[in-house]
Image (cartoon, grey):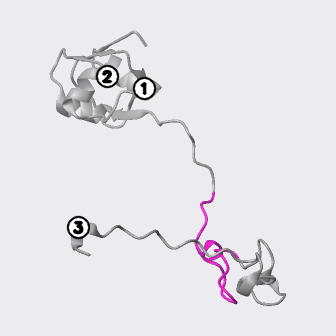
Amino acid sequence: MQLHQLKPSKKKAKKRVGRGGPHGTTATRGTKGQKARSGGGKGKSFEGTKTPLFRRTPKLRGFKSIYDKNNVVNVSALENNFQDGDIISAKILLKKGLISKIKPRVKILGNGDLTKKIIIEECAISKNAEEKIKKAGGEIRNI
């Protein structure tokens, strides 16, 4: 016999317990008890006398909305980043980096002062911000 004549041997057959023979009757589970029963055992989360991990860890409390929050821009940011007579929309705010995304909507709040005449398009506006924009000579379109 030479190496090229060798054939791979068959895999060892799975031990069939509980079918008579040396591993019959109790099927190597021992006699009676929780672990001898079908479905028996303590389960993955059992940790003896210790408090289980899922009870030791802090739980999330309160309410978290599934909806996105508005992207907020203050009047002071418009004062610092835009010139007199500029048209401001959600896309322009996104390009300037004042907001991270357009959806669900962009809202302008009245925190800060405004001296420049700016034109706002397609943005939600608080009452305070609206007063400051109009007082500076600005304009609001398509609310």
Identify the secondary structure beneath mark 1: loop
Q: Give the mark nearer the N terminus: 3 vs 1.
A: 3
Q: Is residue 142 left or right of residue 78?
A: right
Magenta stretch in the rendered image: 43-61
Dot 1: few (<14), some (14–19), or many (≥20) neighbours within 10 Å? Answer: some
- Foreground of the two, 92 or 119: 92
Give the residue at mark 1.
105
Which sits in the foreground, 61 or 128? 61
Residue under the point 34% across and 33% down = 73
In percent of width and height, residue 106 lies at: 39, 27
Q: SS for tag 2?
A: helix
Q: Amino acid at mark 2?
A: Ala
For this orientation, the residue located farthest to the right is: 32
Residue at mark 3: 4
* Residue at the left extreme, as displayed: 83
Task: Indicate left or right for 136 with 104 as reference.
Answer: left
Q: Identify the amino acid type marked 1.
A: Arg
Question: Taking the image as drawn, is residue 26 in sight?
Answer: yes
Q: Nearer the viewer, mark 3 or mark 1?
A: 3
C-beta proximity under 8 Å, tags 2 and 1:
yes
